[in-house]
Image (cartoon, rainbow, N blue to C red):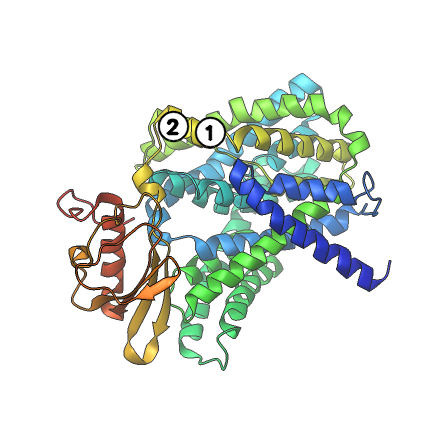
């Protein structure tokens, strides 16, 4: 096919995928399933476009995952997840290890596969998917701490699982001892963390002081910095995924010029990466081979969802409590167990042993494909119901404010754009009842497509957009006050709500 035809097919696929996102949003399904369907339709089982290279799929997949992780870090609010990070780190390391071992032991016994393949399968399935978690859970009314654990875990657990799959799929894995395996994993994580913690602050410092000639260059520079971190860590034999996530997390929570534009650019790049990734993985799959993978896939998926994931959550929570890093009650643990969504990451990881020529790896890929489709269909749409049944829903927290800023450097001030969501207790509050600091003022209200300058007695309504001008020194105080009122109303301070998370 000519380049023009490839461009036409690619553009048409992207447009169709974008249109399908609305359907996915309405039904509660992760959009990855629809994108995979497009890939199946385009591949050998559909229109017949050939794509049979696991090596190329692996390289494209890992690059796309880096973009998705970068967007996850850039859009994660550090104050929202800070208290959840210790438990998330335990779940991303100890929890991943428990999940790998449980899946490997039970699958080896039930399906009769060899120990190495069982360990690879356990490692491939151990990571929760950042894209699936971000797309589904950010719409759920969860307390900040619980949502923060899930978001931070999905960002952190990619690194150890990628390392585990690569090491287990290597030619020398049979000679490696457990001690060697743990040492190599620890060294890669330490190097990746060091690179991320070095590139992130350095990049933020440079961007605040370099006056670029066009605002559109800042988002490109930020995303480029995350890939500098990724590539640098890989060249140093460290974890590129941990490096890119930490770099993005630091940059996303730094006071950078044109931060709103940067977040929008990153979200667009991540959506494009998700669409391309899932469509590619769908094209790589062979529908004719899937029936033989259904039964072992369902057995493995059931072990993962009902045994391995819950046990990993309980062990991680208990260890975190013993180390005084935090604790979750049984309701939170049950929800964390059910909310461990799998998506593109396990499928991409399944291409690593396939590309390395590990025996039985094609069957493993098919099983993982079946597991992702079936259990995403089962878990994704039921998460709101499970949250309500377990009593972990927090309607007041579901409508956290999305606050963006456009820095006014010369005035040492910020312009905050606040969208009032449905259900926010800002609805009905008069402007003067916000009790903003002396250095802040609501200067404009956009309502039903029309803007006006509010009076002190103007009542805020749901779906309003507020423009708040504030001095840089009191911006954090303004954001906390707005979040507090959004959650608890104009008497938030009286109820002890400070909007800190």
Viewer can see residue 116:
no
Residue that carries the numbered disc 1 in the rendered image: 337
Q: Is residue 165 left or right of residue 353?
A: left
Crowdedness of circle 1 by 10 Å Cα count: few (<14), some, many (20+)?
A: many
374 over 185 or under it: above or below: above
Q: Along the line of sight, which residue is nearer the eye, 366 or 447?
A: 447
Say which residue appears at 26% left-offset and 54% top-offset.
460
Q: Quadrant of residue 137?
A: top left
Residue 289 vs 247, above or below: the answer is above
Question: What's the mark number on residue 373?
Answer: none
Q: Quadrant of residue 24?
A: top right
Relative image position of residue 170 (x, y in whole percent):
70, 43
Foreground of the two, 126 or 477 = 477
Earlier-in-chain disc, 2 versus 1: 1
- Total number of numbered labels? 2
Q: Considering the image in quadrants, where does the N terminus appear?
A: bottom right
Q: Are marks 2 and 1 in contact (CB under 8 Å)?
A: no
Q: CA distance from mark 2 to mark 1?
A: 15 Å
Residue drawn where x is 21% and y is 49% of the image: 498
The residue to which callout 2 is attached is 388
Residue projecting furthest to the left: 494
Q: Camera-side residue: 326 or 69?
A: 69
Residue at x 76% of width, y 41% of height: 41
Between 45 and 286, the residue placed more toward the observer is: 45
């Amino acid at each position: 096919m000519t380049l023009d035809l490839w461009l036409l097919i690619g553009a048409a696929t992207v447009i169709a995928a974008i249109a399908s996102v609305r359907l996915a949003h309405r039904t509660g399904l992760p959009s990855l399933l629809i994108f995979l369907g497009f890939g199946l339709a385009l591949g050998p089982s559909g229109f017949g476009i050939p794509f049979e290279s696991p090596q190329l799929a692996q390289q494209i997949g890992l690059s796309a995952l880096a973009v998705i992780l970068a967007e996850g870090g850039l859009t994660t609010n550090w104050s929202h997840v800070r208290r959840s990070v210790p438990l998330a780190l335990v779940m991303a390391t100890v929890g991943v290890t428990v999940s790998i071992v449980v899946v490997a032991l039970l699958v080896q016994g039930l399906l009769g596969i060899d120990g190495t393949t069982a360990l690879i399968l356990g490692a491939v399935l151990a990571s929760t998917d950042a894209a699936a978690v971000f797309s589904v859970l950010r719409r759920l009314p969860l307390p900040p701490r619980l949502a923060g654990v899930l978001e931070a875990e999905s960002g952190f657990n990619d690194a150890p699982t990628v390392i585990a799959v690569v090491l287990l799929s290597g030619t020398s894995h049979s000679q490696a001892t457990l001690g060697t395996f743990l040492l190599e994993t620890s060294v890669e994580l330490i190097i990746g963390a060091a690179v991320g913690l070095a590139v992130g602050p350095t990049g933020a410092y440079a961007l605040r002081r370099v006056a670029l000639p066009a605002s559109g260059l800042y988002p490109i520079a930020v995303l480029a910095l995350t890939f500098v971190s990724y590539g640098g860590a890989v060249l140093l034999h460290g974890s590129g995924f941990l490096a890119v996530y930490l770099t993005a997390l630091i940059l996303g929570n730094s006071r950078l010029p044109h931060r709103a534009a940067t977040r929008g650019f990153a979200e667009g790049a991540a959506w494009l990466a998700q669409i391309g990734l899932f469509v590619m993985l769908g094209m790589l799959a062979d529908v004719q081979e899937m029936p033989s993978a259904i039964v072992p896939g369902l057995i493995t998926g059931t072990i993962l969802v009902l045994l391995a994931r819950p046990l990993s959550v309980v062990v991680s929570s208990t260890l975190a409590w013993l180390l005084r890093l935090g604790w979750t009650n049984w309701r939170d643990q049950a929800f964390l167990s059910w909310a461990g969504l799998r998506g593109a990451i396990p499928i991409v990881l399944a291409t690593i042993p396939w590309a390395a020529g590990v025996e039985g790896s094609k069957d493993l890929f098919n099983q993982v494909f079946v597991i992702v489709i079936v259990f995403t269909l089962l878990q994704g749409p039921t998460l709101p119901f499970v949250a309500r049944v377990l009593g972990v829903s927090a309607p007041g927290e579901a409508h956290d404010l999305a606050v963006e800023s456009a820095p006014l450097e010369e005035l040492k001030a910020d312009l905050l754009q606040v969208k009032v969501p449905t259900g926010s207790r800002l609805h009905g509050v008069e402007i003067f009842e916000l009790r903003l600091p002396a250095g802040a003022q609501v200067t404009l209200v956009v309502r039903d497509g029309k803007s006006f300058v509010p009076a002190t007695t103007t009542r805020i309504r749901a779906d309003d957009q507020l423009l708040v001008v504030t001095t840089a020194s009191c911006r954090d105080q303004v954001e906390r006050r707005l979040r507090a009122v959004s959650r608890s109303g104009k008497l938030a301070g009286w109820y002890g709500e400070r909007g800190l998370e």
